[in-house]
Amino acid sequence: MIQVALKKHSMKTKKIALFGTNTQGLWEVIEETLRKGHSVTAIVDNPGEFKLTHPNFIAVKGNLMNPNEVARYAEGHDLVMCLHDPALSGLQSHVDANRAIITGARKMGIEQVISLGHPISLKLENTKDFFDLWKSIAHV
């Protein structure tokens, strides 16, 4: 009889700088990230809205649109994450947010950047119009 020993895959815990606005989506990402054992610094407009107390979580005031603030708060983190809900009338702000996040992360030598955004009120997902709308985002 041959026995195969399965080695448990161990994922390195990460220190994550999470930029965004205080939305349900942000809360869900924070909760899941903490549940997986990572540390999270949430950089948001109003950190006082967070009532979460966890040894691996802090919330601070910052502006994701400012590459210098992104760099300042990203320092010492393993990756930078951005949750930005673009307004349908102003997708350029989403492009600008992604540029700021990438520029700030790059200044600190952080190579891992995750950006999430979705125009929630737009019901076009599997259409050419939807993909055309996001071309400028993908370009960033």
Image (tube, grey):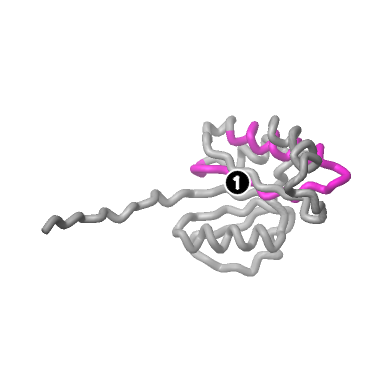
Asked if residue 20 lies left or right of residue 77, the reply is right
The residue under the point 67% across, 40% down is 69
Q: On screen, 96 above or below 56?
A: above
* Magenta stretch encompasses residue 112: no
Kindly identify the amino acid type of the residue bearing the numbered disc 1: Met
Q: Residue furthest front?
A: 1
Q: Where does the image place residue 58, in percent across and percent down from the top left?
A: 57, 58
Q: Residue furthest left?
A: 1
The residue under the point 64% across, 54% down is 60
* Magenta stretch encompasses residue 93: yes
Which secondary structure dominates the residues rendered in magenta?
helix
Q: Where does the image place residue 103, in percent across and percent down from the top left?
A: 64, 31
Q: Which residue is mark 1?
A: 81
Q: Residue furthest right?
A: 89
Q: Can you tell which quarter of the image residue 74 is in?
A: top right
Q: Is residue 106 visible?
A: yes
In magenta, the rendered stretch is 76-105
Camera-side residue of 138 and 73: 138
Q: Can you tell which quarter of the image residue 3 is in?
A: bottom left
* Count of numbered circles on the image: 1
Q: Is residue 94 visible?
A: no
Q: Quadrant of the C terminus?
A: top right
Q: Quadrant of the N terminus?
A: bottom left
Q: Where does the image place residue 59, in percent across and percent down from the top left?
A: 62, 57
Camera-side residue of 64 and 94: 94
Camera-side residue of 122 and 67: 122
